[in-house]
Image (cartoon, grey):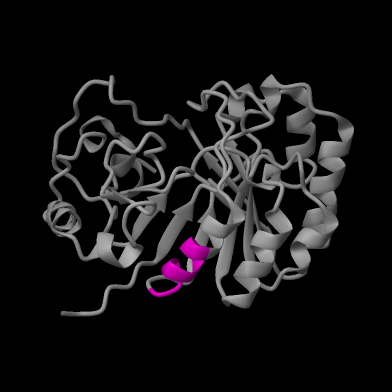
């Protein structure tokens, strides 16, 4: 059997967040993975994948042991992609060799009372990113606040592509909208291309292993790391059966039936 390698694994070190963004499904979580669990998970992940995404729901920089977590990633030679709302950026963050990319979600800032310091910190990151990749994410550009528009258009032209390169390793990305899939949404056609379990999986704050980063409630769970090792889960019949569904482009798992994302990202039906 060919050795299993994944391209990315999402690790939800917390579901807590310091913001209340209207597009988010987060129900004000307050759970944090223990440092011992994170250390164990990272060592297991390293056997299958080098790229870690510190996000599903929640703000990862809220974790009280975030520096220790990065040191663990440094030691294991992992490549970390951090998704953050940008309110808790700190100077020493970019010093970690494991940190590969910082993605800052700015699309909901228009709905919040954000201070001038917020934009100043992002500006500092843009101008001193030390070869880290910086991605600034904007959704629904037409409804951004004036402060956010002033910030945005000080860097890029009014007319721009959906993936705009500002300078080496600094990118602005745009999308018309984003919606978390919900089990209560209408059922979509159950065929289409998705890379869940083929290239990626997610580990939630409670140890649940699921098929992708859009499943924060674990509807597509294939196991839990508090009960079995990642190796045992990835060698289970349940993983094998679910993987086969994705390979055959059959979107029949609980949440997949209600997800539109594959049409935007993988099926080529949208830009």
Name which quarter of the figure residue 59 lies in: top right
Residue 114 in the image, given as x and y percentages of width and height: 79, 27
In which quadrant will I find the N terminus?
bottom left
Residue occupying the point 69% across, 29% down = 109
- In the rendered image, residue 44 lying in the magenta stretch gets the answer yes
Name which quarter of the figure residue 38 lies in: bottom right
Front residue of 84 and 227: 227
Does residue 216 appear anywhere in the picture?
yes
- In the rendered image, residue 249 lying in the magenta stretch gets the answer no
Residue 40 in the image, given as x and y percentages of width and height: 49, 64
Q: How many marks?
A: 0
Task: Answer left or right for 15 relative to 233.
Answer: right
Residue occupying the point 62% across, 32% down = 107
Residue 106 in the image, given as x and y percentages of width and height: 66, 36
Q: Is residue 174 above or below residue 22?
A: below
Residue 44 in the image, given as x and y percentages of width and height: 42, 68
Front residue of 243 and 40: 40
Front residue of 108 and 174: 108
Task: Answer left or right for 183 relative to 147.
Answer: left
Residue occupying the point 29% across, 34% down = 259
In the orientation shown, which residue stands out farthest toward the bottom? 2
- Magenta stretch bounds: 40-47
Residue occupying the point 83% across, 62% down = 128
């Amino acid at each position: 059997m060919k050795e299993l390698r994944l391209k990315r694994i999402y690790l939800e070190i917390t579901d807590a967040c310091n913001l209340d963004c209207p597009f988010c499904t987060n129900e004000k979580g307050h759970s944090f993975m223990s440092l011992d669990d994170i250390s164990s998970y990272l060592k297991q992940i390293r056997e299958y994948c080098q790229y870690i995404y510190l996000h599903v729901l929640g703000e990862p920089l809220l974790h009280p042991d975030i520096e220790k977590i990065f040191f663990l990633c440094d030691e294991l030679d992992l490549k970390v992609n951090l998704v953050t709302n940008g309110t808790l950026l700190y100077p020493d963050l970019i010093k970690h060799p494991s940190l590969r990319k910082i993605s800052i979600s700015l699309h909901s800032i228009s709905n919040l009372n954000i201070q001038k310091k917020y934009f100043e910190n992002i500006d500092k990151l843009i101008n001193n990113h030390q070869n880290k990749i910086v991605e600034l994410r904007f959704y629904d550009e037409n409804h951004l606040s004036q402060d956010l528009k002033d910030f945005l258009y000080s860097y890029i032209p009014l007319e721009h592509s959906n993936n705009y390169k500002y300078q080496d390793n600094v990118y602005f990305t745009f999308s018309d909208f984003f919606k978390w899939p919900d089990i209560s949404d209408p059922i979509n056609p159950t065929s289409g291309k998705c890379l869940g379990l083929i290239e990626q999986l997610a580990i939630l704050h409670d140890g649940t292993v699921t098929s992708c980063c859009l499943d924060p409630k674990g509807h597509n769970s294939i196991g839990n790391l508090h009960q079995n090792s990642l190796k045992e889960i990835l060698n289970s019949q349940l993983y094998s059966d679910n993987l086969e569904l994705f390979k055959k482009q059959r979107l029949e798992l609980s949440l997949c039936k209600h997800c539109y994302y594959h049409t935007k990202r993988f099926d080529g039906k949208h830009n």
